Amino acid sequence: MFARLGKNTEFQKVYKKGKSRANKYLVMYVLSGDSGGNRYGFSVSKKVGNSVERHRITRLLRESVRKNDVFITEGNRIVIVARQTIKNKKFQDVDGAVFHLMKMHKLLRDVMD
């Protein structure tokens, strides 16, 4: 299981001081340099859909992060923001978008570790 960002102040710190990269489905903000494991936050706006759709997208994002967390260097605060285009996408699309952004941020560690 991975740790989550909790308070709004934690999210705001990542938004203001972190670096952002985006693709068609997601925007990822990363703030590096902390000690300990990675902490994740997810943001899915009401613009994306109703609560059922938003919760489904959040579950897909959480599962993708759970699956890929072992490949990421430690000490990062990561916020993933869903865009409207992610609506009605399958897990493979969401997982590919998350992995793509992790590569763009150079968060992946060597597989040989």
Image (cartoon, grey):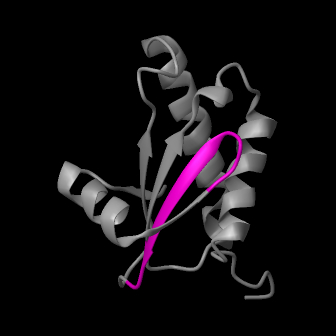
- Residue 10 is left or right of residue 77, and the answer is left
Please tell me which residue is depicted at 80% across the width and 38% down the height of the picture.
Answer: 92
Is the magenta region chiefly helix, strand or loop?
Answer: strand
Query: Magenta residues, as a range?
Result: 22-33
In the image, residue 64 above or below residue 49: below
**In this orientation, does residue 61 appear?**
yes
Residue 78 in magenta? no
In percent of width and height, residue 67 lies at 67, 54
- Residue 13 is left or right of residue 72, and the answer is left
In percent of width and height, residue 55 lies at 48, 23
- Residue 16 is left or right of residue 100, and the answer is left
Residue 27 in magenta? yes
In percent of width and height, residue 81 lies at 49, 44
Please tell me which residue is depicted at 72% across the width and 57% down the height of the picture.
Answer: 99
User: Residue 44 is drawn in which quadrant?
Assistant: top left
**In this orientation, does residue 7 appear?**
no
In the image, residue 4 above or below residue 46: below
In the image, residue 96 above or below residue 32: above
User: Residue 26 is drawn in which quadrant?
Assistant: top right
Please tell me which residue is depicted at 44% across the width and 44% down the height of the picture.
Answer: 42
